[in-house]
């Protein structure tokens, strides 16, 4: 066999809406006025919920969470393409998708307040709870896609993860498995450039994340992740292919985490202000608003009204969550859900726990609050200082 | 009544076949489980009978085999996945700990993962490295998992049927040395489904309670046979069958009756199930004890290569000695 070049698939890139709000009409996906405005509302709702949650967290009202700020177009753009029959498999930074999928603000806050009850509404929704161990959701996604395929349903499993997750074995096993079994799955990477303090450049020597699709014989595409239309279009196309039995797709949304990794993180330690400012100019929400204004679908009075509505919605959701916490929910409830029925030795342990907490209110709120700049790294330090 | 004498491999094969017939949601997958019938032939003939949609050869990817079983289970299927040897389960342990075991707890029952992870396990067949370990305690230590270890063909069938029908995830570890060691009569007409979380009194007795499971039941039976014949022993032998959730009650009642207890397992000594049983006896039957509890276990060493395997695995003589010691106290 003489030396030759092996022909490999190519990776497309896609961008529809530029930073100044101008558009490539030939690539513009079909969306009604209502769908567009609904999408825009979700973009703003996601941003404002994060902002308000950050205030609540700093006030010690809620626990640690991972904001989606900067990534709203990647999230809402893809979520608007996903149907109810499809499955949504999140990592831990998909507030926008979860809201589009019907999660209530109340349940979101309930989760950050540390109550499992937040997940009780998942039954029958085709939505999975968040996966905290990075990338691990990529390895069970094939199972859900496989179930869909066996039942011959017109649906697909859509899994979300970040650039850091693509260094995990679970991502590679999952995508390969889906390719080998030709499963209806969409692997959606929000490449937000940072895995806590590790930049994308240190995560892989590869030119793109999308190109990893080639190795597994599946479709791959890299899109501007701050471009609502590009993300929507790529996700829609991937879902159409999956539902036609044409297999999985890897979508890389190139975006940026404008905020902290989680509320326990301090990005000033590891990245330059100039970089953040450069990405702020590419803000996905601003970009879509400019387009809507150009198309005469939106103006400042619309915006004012929207901000008011959203503010009230977030406040109401938070208050509902707080009401639940204040109702003193059963502190021993977790014993009942380890197995379908509680084994005798566990019932015994439950009775001991009951004795332990007798007469005390033990439901833990996030009352300690923010420990100052430096996030998790500073917690021990400050506690030590407090002892003096 | 039609009965047949089967080995454990054949009994497991029968159980899988029966459950595939009973419930169309049951499916089998793993490495080489299809045309090859599994390296031990537990899934032999199933692909021919039930087709490639329900008996599937997967890529060589333990994390994804276990992960897929989890996804399928949450979706609504009844997956039974095989990990070729329990020594390769660690590749998928992350999925077990992070997702399989905790889905019920983290959703307060809104979602569940009814699935079975099967794996040939433990030593005694002169296998190569990574093929002889007894690491059941990893799974016993993880709340939310059911851990089952059968000891013979008959309970392998009834426990497997129960595992597949359970709504909690089951780790089903099959002692390799028992696979073809002996046959038991199995009633093919009876839908024999064991009760999960229930130990079995294999031999009622009055002098000493001997608790064991898996391949060690076979060794224990050899040990007591000698004692019964030579010294008129009357031991009560308990086969745990389910290690988690463990049937504390059966053990406690027995120890209260006999006042003596010996525990036998092949797993490492430190943190083995014997340690937990001893603790539970101390909590609930301390005043009934007439002698310190003895345990016969594998050592706290890596399982040596097979040339020295017999030094590691408890044998009938060491079990006999422990029982004798407790009786003589």
Image (spheres, grey):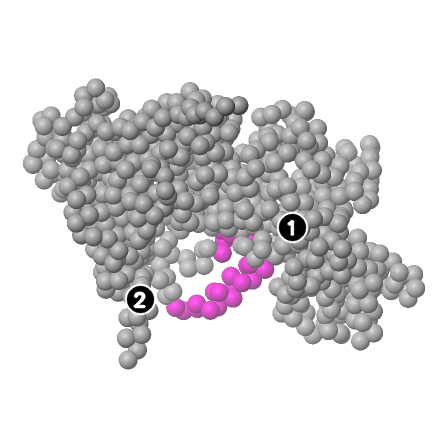
- Residue at left offset 18%, top offset 40%: A283
On the picture, is A199 further left or further right than B267?
left
- Residue at left offset 83%, top offset 74%: B328
Q: Chain of mark 2?
A: A
The residue lying toward the viewer, choosing from B111 and B156, is: B156
Stretch of the chain drawn in magenta: A335-360
Compared to residue A295, the image places residue B8 above or below, namely: below
Image location of residue A31, percent across then percent down: 23, 23
Q: Using the rendered view, name the quadrant where residue A156 is placed.
A: top left
Image location of residue A374, percent across then percent down: 26, 62
- The single residue placed furthest to the front in the displayed view is A2
Q: Which residue in the structure is indicated by mark 2?
A: A379
Q: Using the rendered view, name the quadrant where residue A372 is placed.
A: bottom left
Q: Chain of mark 1?
A: B
Mark 1 vs mark 2, foreground winner is 1
Q: Are marks 1 and 2 on the same chain?
A: no
- The single residue placed furthest to the bottom in the displayed view is A388
Which secondary structure class fits the magenta region best?
helix
On the picture, is B199 further left or further right than B315?
left
The residue lying toward the viewer, choosing from B33 and A44, is: B33
Image location of residue B64, percent across then percent down: 51, 39
On the picture, is B285 further left or further right than A57?
right
Q: Are marks 1 and 2 in contact (CB under 8 Å)?
A: no
Q: Secondary structure at mark 2?
A: helix
Quadrant occupied by the N terminus of chain B:
top right
Q: Which residue in the structure is indicated by mark 1?
A: B130
Quote the CA–CA distance across marks 1 and 2. Answer: 42 Å
On the picture, is B43 further left or further right than A350?
right
- Residue at left offset 28%, top offset 43%: A192
């Amino acid at each position: 066999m003489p030396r030759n070049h092996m022909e490999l698939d190519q990776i497309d890139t896609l961008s529809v809406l530029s930073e100044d709000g101008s558009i490539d009409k030939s690539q513009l996906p079909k969306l009604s006025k209502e769908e567009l405005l609904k999408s825009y509302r979700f973009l703003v709702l996601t941003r404002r919920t994060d902002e308000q949650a950050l205030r609540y967290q700093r006030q010690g009202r809620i626990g640690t969470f991972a904001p989606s700020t900067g990534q709203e177009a990647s999230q809402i753009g893809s979520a608007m393409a996903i149907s109810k029959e499809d499955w949504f498999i999140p990592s831990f930074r998909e507030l926008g998708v979860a809201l589009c999928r019907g999660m209530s603000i109340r349940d979101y806050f309930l989760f950050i307040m540390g109550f499992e009850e937040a997940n009780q509404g998942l039954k029958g929704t085709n939505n999975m709870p968040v996966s905290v161990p990075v990338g691990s959701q990529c390895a069970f996604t094939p199972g859900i896609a496989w179930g869909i395929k066996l039942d011959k349903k017109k649906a697909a499993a859509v899994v979300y993860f970040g650039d850091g997750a693509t260094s995990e074995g679970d991502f590679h096993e999952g995508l390969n498995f889906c390719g080998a079994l030709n499963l209806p799955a969409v692997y959606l990477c929000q490449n937000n450039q940072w895995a806590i303090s590790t930049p994308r450049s240190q995560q892989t020597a590869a030119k793109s994340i999308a190109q990893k699709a080639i190795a597994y014989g599946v479709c791959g595409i890299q899109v501007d992740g701050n471009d609502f239309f590009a993300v929507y279009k790529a996700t829609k196309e991937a879902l159409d292919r999956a539902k036609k039995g044409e297999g999985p797709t890897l979508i890389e949304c190139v975006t940026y985490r404008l905020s902290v990794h989680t509320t326990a993180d301090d990005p000033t330690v590891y990245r330059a202000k100039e970089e953040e400012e450069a990405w702020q100019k590419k803000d996905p929400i601003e970009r879509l608003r400019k387009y809507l204004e150009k198309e005469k679908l939106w103006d400042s009075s619309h915006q004012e009204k929207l901000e008011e509505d959203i503010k009230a919605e977030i406040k109401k959701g938070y208050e509902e969550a707080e009401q639940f916490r204040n109702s003193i929910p059963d502190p021993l409830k977790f014993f009942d859900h380890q197995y379908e029925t509680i084994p005798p030795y566990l019932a015994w342990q439950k009775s001991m726990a009951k004795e332990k907490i007798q007469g005390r209110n033990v439901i833990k709120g996030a009352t300690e609050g923010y420990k100052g700049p430096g996030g998790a790294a500073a917690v021990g330090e400050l506690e030590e200082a407090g002892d003096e | 009544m039609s009965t047949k004498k089967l080995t454990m491999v054949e009994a497991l094969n029968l159980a899988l076949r029966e459950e595939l017939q009973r419930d169309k949601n049951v499916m089998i997958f793993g490495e080489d489980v299809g045309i090859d019938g599994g390296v031990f032939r537990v899934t032999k003939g199933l692909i021919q009978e039930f087709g490639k949609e329900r008996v599937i050869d997967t890529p060589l990817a333990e994390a994804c085999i276990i992960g897929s079983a989890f996804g399928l289970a949450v979706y609504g299927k009844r997956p039974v996945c095989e990990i070729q040897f329990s020594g390769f389960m660690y590749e998928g342990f992350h999925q077990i700990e992070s997702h399989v075991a905790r889905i019920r707890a983290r959703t307060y029952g809104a979602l569940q993962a009814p699935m079975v992870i099967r794996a040939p396990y433990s030593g005694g067949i002169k296998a190569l490295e990574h093929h002889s370990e007894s690491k059941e305690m990893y799974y016993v230590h993880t709340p939310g998992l059911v851990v089952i270890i059968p000891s013979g063909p008959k309970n392998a069938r009834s426990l497997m049927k129960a595992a597949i029908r359970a709504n909690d995830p089951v780790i089903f570890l099959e002692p390799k040395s028992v696979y073809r060691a002996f046959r038991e009569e199995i009633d093919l007409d009876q839908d024999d489904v064991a009760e999960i979380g229930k130990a079995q009194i294999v031999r009622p007795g009055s002098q000493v309670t001997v608790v064991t499971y898996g391949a060690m039941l076979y060794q224990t039976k050899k040990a007591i046979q000698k004692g019964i014949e030579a010294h008129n022993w009357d031991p009560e032998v308990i086969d745990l069958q389910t290690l988690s959730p463990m049937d504390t009650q059966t053990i406690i009642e027995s120890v209260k009756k006999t006042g003596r207890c010996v525990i036998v397992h092949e797993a490492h000594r430190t943190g083995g199930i014997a340690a937990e049983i001893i603790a539970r006896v101390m909590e609930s039957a301390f005043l009934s004890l007439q002698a310190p509890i003895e345990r016969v276990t594998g050592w706290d060493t890596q399982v040596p290569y097979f040339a020295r395997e017999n030094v590691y695995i408890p044998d009938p003589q060491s079990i006999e000695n422990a029982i004798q010691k407790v009786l003589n106290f």
